[in-house]
Every structure is written in C-alpha cells, then in structure tokens.
Amino acid sequence: MKAAAITWWIISVLVIVSSEGQSLTNNFSENQNKTMKMIMEHFHNKDHIRNGFKVSNVIKAVEIDYISGAFVNLEIELKQTTCHKSHWTKTDCGLLKNGRTFNCFACFKFSYHSEKILSQLLDCVATHQVEARVQRRNQSCTDVEMKQGFDKPGSYGFLKSN
C-alpha cells in the first residue's frame, strides 16, 4: 500500500498543473471533464451555497489508466460570482470583489470503457480549511485509486490467482 501511495504521489507531483482561468480545462480528457462537471454540480447543490462559483485555478489534474479503469484526481479553486447558484453555468457572471473562495478536491475511479463509477471522493471546503485536510484527502484518494473493478468476465478469477 505504501508503494502505491508513493507512486501516486510521484506521478501527482509530475503532473501538477496550475493556471488561472477556465481555459486550462479545454485540454481536459473526457474523464477529467466528467469529473469537473460532477464537482461543480455537487458543489452547487449544497444548501449553504447561494451564489454561483467559477473555476479560478486548476491546482492539480491527474489521470492514470489502469486495467480496472481510469483514475482521475482534480483539485480546483472556486471563486464566488455575481450570479445566483441556479445560473452557475452562465459565462457572463463576474467575480465578486471580496467573494468567498473554496478548494475542491476530487478523486474518481471509472470502470474501464464504461460510465460506471467504481469509487469516488468529493471534498469542497473554504480555502482556509484545506491545510487541516491534506493528509486525510490524500489517504482517501489513494483508497479510491486502488479500488478494483470486477466487471469483466474472468477478471475476478484472474486477479485472485496472483
């Protein structure tokens, strides 16, 4: 388990992406776009959120293909806009000058060639709360990454025979 965590950490460090604005998401893969959509929908469905939020920074964007499926890890920063949360998809929403800022961390394991989600982690908190959650987030993300899918004929027997 330690070796997997170290491998994940090394790959994450090598693939860290940081930029301002939403234009960086144009280079996302299909799975990364699905993950981003799920993050934004999850966030805007929270009761305590009144305004819409925009992605202001992509802190991390990782995708790794495994035999059991694709693993996606995204960490983004969201900033509060002038629009109501029901209109968060509008492109003309301006950022509030002293608006709230949130950090969203997500890990998804998608089944190989399928829409099925094998495992997931979604955690959005105010940016000042991130430091206290880093270790727990990384451990939970490693658990998501290591999730095995047994949806192919013979895959369970093959994996158990090792």
Image (spheres, grey):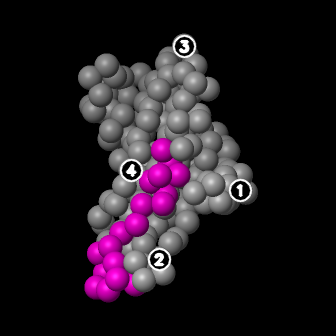
Going from the N terminus, do you reach mark 1 or mark 2 first? 1
Q: Which mark is residue 67?
A: 2
Helix, strand or loop under label 4: strand
Label 1 Cα crowd, 10 Å radius (few <14 / some 14-19 / many 20+): few
Viewer-proximal residue among 15 and 68: 68
Q: Secondary structure at mark 1?
A: helix
Q: Amino acid at mark 2?
A: Ile
Q: Position of residue 81 (x, y in %)?
A: 44, 25
Segment colored magenta: 140-158
**CA distance for labels 1 and 2:** 20 Å
Q: Position of residue 162 (x, y in %)?
A: 48, 81
Reading the chain from its start, which is encountered first: label 1 or label 4? 1
Task: For label 2, count other residues whose C-alpha is less than 10 Å away and answer few (under 14), some (14-19) or many (20+).
Answer: few
Mark 3 to mark 4 CA distance (whole Å): 32 Å
Residue 10 in the image: state x and y as whole percent. 71, 56
Residue depicted at x 54% and y 13%: 98
Q: Earlier in the sequence, mark 2 or mark 4?
A: 2
Q: Crowding at label 3, few (<14), some or many (≥20) Cα neighbours within 10 Å?
A: few
In the depicted view, which residue is nearer to us: 113 or 86?
113
Instruction: Give the residue number, with chain letter if any, for mark 3.
Output: 98
Q: What residue is drawn where x is 62% and y is 42%?
A: 59
The residue at which mark 4 appears reads as: 120
Horizontal side, residue 145 vs residue 12: left or right: left
Query: What residue is pinned by disc 1?
Result: 10
User: Which quarter of the image is occupied by the N terminus?
Assistant: bottom right
Disc 3 marks a residue whose amino acid type is Asn
Task: Kindly report the distance in space between the C-alpha atoms of the residues bearing marks 2 and 4.
Answer: 17 Å
